[in-house]
Amino acid sequence: MHDIEQAQKEIAQLSEDLQHHQDLYYKEGQPIISDREYDHMMDRLLALETQFPTLKLPESPSQRVGSDLGSGFPEFAHTIPILSLDKAYTFEGVLQWIERSRQRGESRLSFVVEEKIDGVSLVLYYEKGYLVRAVTRGNGFVGNDVTPNAKTITSIPLKLSQPLTIAVRGEIFLPKAEFERINKSMEIPFANPRNLAAGTIRRLKSSETARIPLRMFAYEAFFDAGETPLTTHVEILKLLKDLGFYVNSEVAVFAETEDRALLEAQKLGMDSVPSGSFQALPSYIEKMNSVRDQLPHEIDGLVVKVNELGVRELLGYTGHHPRWALAFKFEAPEAQSRVDDIDVQVGRTGRITPVARVATVKVGNSMVSNVTLHNQDYINMLELAIGDSVAISKRGDVIPAIERVIEKNEEGNTTWVIPRNCPSCNSILERQGAHTFCMNNDCPAQILGRITFFVGRDQMDIEGFGPETVTFLVNKGLVHDIPDIYTVNYADLVGEPGFGEKKASALAQAVEKSKDRPYRTVLAALGIPDFGRKTVDLLVNGGIVSMEELIDIVESQDRARFLAIKGFGEKTIDALFAQFADPAFRERIARLEKLGLHFKEEPTESEQLSQTFAQEVWCVTGSFTHFNPRSLALKEIEARGGRTTSSVTRKTTHLLAGEGAGSKLQQALTYGTRIVKEDEFLQLLEKE
């Protein structure tokens, strides 16, 4: 009896958690757990429902594939099954699945391997060759009709080359280079191309979707009764290409013998399609995993499919996935550690961020000792407590993340909760949406954050004015707000720990020099939420060239003036209005203006320079003699009309390579990008 009660509780909790993660993945495009962790949860639920079938809930997530249903679009019932895929994480798992498929299929089978695009699934319905409907996957049975948005995607044919009635399944994605270009203009950048693509395909206005260069790879076709049937998946891919669809050329074919695989591969009509016997499949998977960072689009694995369509019908489907296809998922680097402590950081806007202090461990190629926990919901989802043993991965091979709890602590610690009071000023914290905030503008941590942000290298760039100097001046009572840094008598600091005459003099000169920074820089350095350099550029380029004019527009509540600026949205305008409604912020501006900072756009030196780098895309890597920090070189490029990027892609035209240039130099050589050394770069600048 006790086992049944425990199972009932666990089934209810798993069902609730899985539904939450489905919503985050399909509706929000913002997953907070890995695919593997999600699969573990689903497998556990399926096991419990099999053991206790009477406890299965009517709304059990095991009957669904996930849902992206929203209220903004009409619903449409799919006429074909749009299911998920079974998964494997090892070479052995793939080969075992192939062997099971061969035994069940009672036939000599071949298998097609395609890239698993990390994008958004879409089903296109055509009647007599014309596109009549585009529908998101939804829950696998009902999706959202996003036809007007889909029609803006140039790789989706509006009319086929043959008058077929057909359903085509594909993956919407955004190329890496386009993502980098667009994300640079975002005040709050998207984490990855998939999230941006997911948000774009669900824009309520198709004109907004059209601004983002989405693409779609087509990979499956389903025919209406009476249409001429095909016999293999290879023929489907060939037909899709002939019909005018964008078909991924990175595809491979494997069979029992190399000759058989080569024969099927040649039918695709593509150049150099990899093929081989089943024994060659692991090496192909390993190769694709090693080169995926160099691909123009994101992939998170490979999909292996039975090629013979007749055998597919014989194998059929489960309630969750087709038995004739399998996804091989690439793993992110992962390691095990222990949570020694959890504390909170207070940002300059008052946002509270929990951080786990873990026993230092190597994940991928770096050592990890601190892991951001985002918010209380994330911690609750993990049921994380101090002392727990945890699995740590690097999402996107970059950001450390706790994926799951491996073993609970022996001390009896329960799920950690954000404190009720601010650790800096003891004010009561408030929950706003998913996050927690300290609402006290005079909170010492927020004061330190605002000033440190203002003087930082990417803002006012006051040399020698690092976080330690800010902390010293605030603790000494000499600085209470940003304007105070311009009123301190730095000569009086001589004799204080770390302050000699030379340092005090240099600091005073650097502070005075910062008064020459242009209006754009000053406005961005003030740290208005959702209002960074790119947004400031949009504002000034949109004709609002002074603080006086900006304040007048805000005070008159003229939202239309801001909306007329391309790239401005309601969220940005809301943040701007809220900030200027704060009396302390207005007082800060008034004081800075009296102190001589620029609050009006003036003609810049770059306007006098010829645009010799126009139409060029530059990346900068390594260390330099004349450009320290590297941002100085970036400014020179942008002042001459060039575009800069943080990574090397096929569209990068020049790589400025200094000492210690590493992987970016190798990528540039692979793409044939022009390599420019510091001496040559100086010569290009001197031509001015």
Image (cartoon, helix red, strand yellow):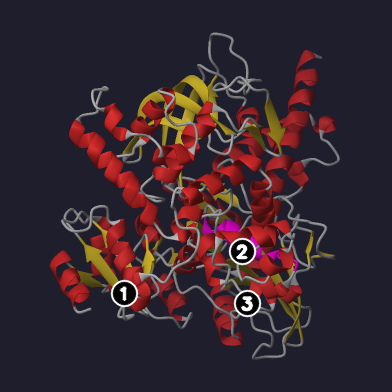
Q: Which labelled disc corresponds to residue 653?
A: 1
State the residue in front, 127 or 351: 351
In primary-sequence order, the first of circles 3 and 1 is 3
Percent of width and height locating residue 507: 28, 40
Q: Are marks 3 and 1 in contact (CB under 8 Å)?
A: no
Please tell me how crowded label 3 is: few (under 14), some (14-19), or many (20+) other residues with Cα within 10 Å. Answer: many
Is residue 626 rendered to the left or right of residue 107? left
Q: Residue at x 69, y 85 (%)?
A: 158
Secondary structure at badge 1 equals loop
Percent of width and height locating residue 281: 40, 58
In primary-sequence order, the first of circles 3 and 2 is 3
Q: Which amino acid does label 1 sit on?
A: Thr
**Viewer-nearest of discs 3 and 2:** 2
Q: What residue type is labelled 3?
A: Ile
Is residue 651 rendered to the left or right of residue 666? right
Q: What stretch is highlighted in magenta?
A: 192-204
Pointer 3 residue: 153
In primary-sequence order, the first of circles 1 and 2 is 2
Q: Are marks 1 and 2 in contact (CB under 8 Å)?
A: no
Q: Does the magenta stretch include residue 198?
A: yes
Q: What residue type is labelled 2?
A: Glu
